[in-house]
Amino acid sequence: TLRHWDIQASTSVGSYSLGAFPIQVFTFSADMRLALATDANRKFHLWEVDPFKLVRSWDAAAAAVLCLAISPDGSHALSGGMDNNVTLWDLETGKAVAVWSGHTSFVHSVAFSPDGSRALSGGRDNTVRLWETASGRSLGAWLGHTDAVLSVAFSQDGTRALSGGSDYGVKLWDTASLSPEGTLLTTWSSHKGWVLHAMFSADGSHVISCSADKTVHVRE
């Protein structure tokens, strides 16, 4: 069951049952207008958030989905999973419009740039990959992690990116240089467990990461 909560009131304002199959991955659009989920039956579900209602569901995933992201304009979504690919979806139709191949193992994280023109993916092959959204062209496979990449994110201006992974590290990248192997700016190694999520603060002044070591680290 998916529940919609009013955080300030701490009350549930709606729910939706997906039947026998549990939700595995869930994400909101940046403007919080849309929500997208996949379930254990590899089915996609798209909701409008306010008011909370189901827009459409579709069966399409070729393999178990491990990550999702919605484009800034809400027209498309990315998924990555156990087929080693990144798939671009048209949310109006529920159809796959492109499949990007390059990773050699599971894809654990995907993200759109703020203008939607580029995308990032992180995989169990220890790479961060940069893509051109319109063409699906690979713009680079960034090397630096020594284990699976579990989280990727763009800065608000799109000129920087973060990645975090099973090697306990958080890495800051320059996305403007378009070096095929990536331009690594710095690495933070303060966590003592897998980095499960890394992100920039809303104003871009801080980096936040959370880890399997049960800590959240904030850096300037």
Image (tube, helix red, strand yellow):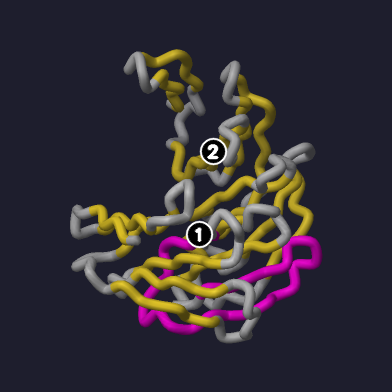
Would you say 71 lies left or right of 121 here?
A: right
Within 10 Å of the Cα at label 2, are there few (<14), some (14-19), or many (20+) other Cα atoms?
some
Image spot of residue 70 (x, y percent): 62, 46
At horizontal 62% and vertical 24% (from top left) the residue drawn is 54
Amino acid type, residue under disc 1 in the picture: Ala
**Residue indicated by mark 1:** 153
Marks 1 and 2 in Cβ contact (< 8 Å): no
Image spot of residue 72 (x, y percent): 66, 45
Q: Toward the viewer: 55 or 114?
A: 114
At horizontal 40% and vertical 72% (from top left) the residue drawn is 171
Residue 186 lies in quadrant: bottom left
Dot 1 or dot 2, earlier in sequence: 2
* Quadrant location, the N terminus: top left
The reply to whether the magenta stretch includes residue 143 is yes
At horizontal 61% and vertical 28% (from top left) the residue drawn is 47
Label 1 and label 2: CA atoms lie apart by 15 Å
Which is closer to the viewer, label 1 or label 2? 1
At horizontal 78% and vertical 39% (from top left) the residue drawn is 93
Q: Secondary structure at mark 2?
A: strand
Image spot of residue 25 (x, y percent): 47, 45
Would you say 118 lies left or right of 93 here?
A: left
Q: Toward the viewer: 76 or 8?
A: 8
Image spot of residue 112 (x, y percent): 62, 56
Amino acid type, residue under disc 2 in the picture: Phe
Q: Toward the viewer: 132 or 95?
A: 132
Q: Which mark is residue 28?
A: 2
The reply to whether the magenta stretch includes residue 130 is yes
* Quadrant location, the C terminus: bottom left
* Magenta stretch, residue numbers: 128-154
Task: From this view, report whether residue 93 is shown above or below residue 159.
Answer: above
Within 10 Å of the Cα at label 1, are there few (<14), some (14-19), or many (20+) other Cα atoms?
many
Would you say 119 lies left or right of 153 here?
A: right
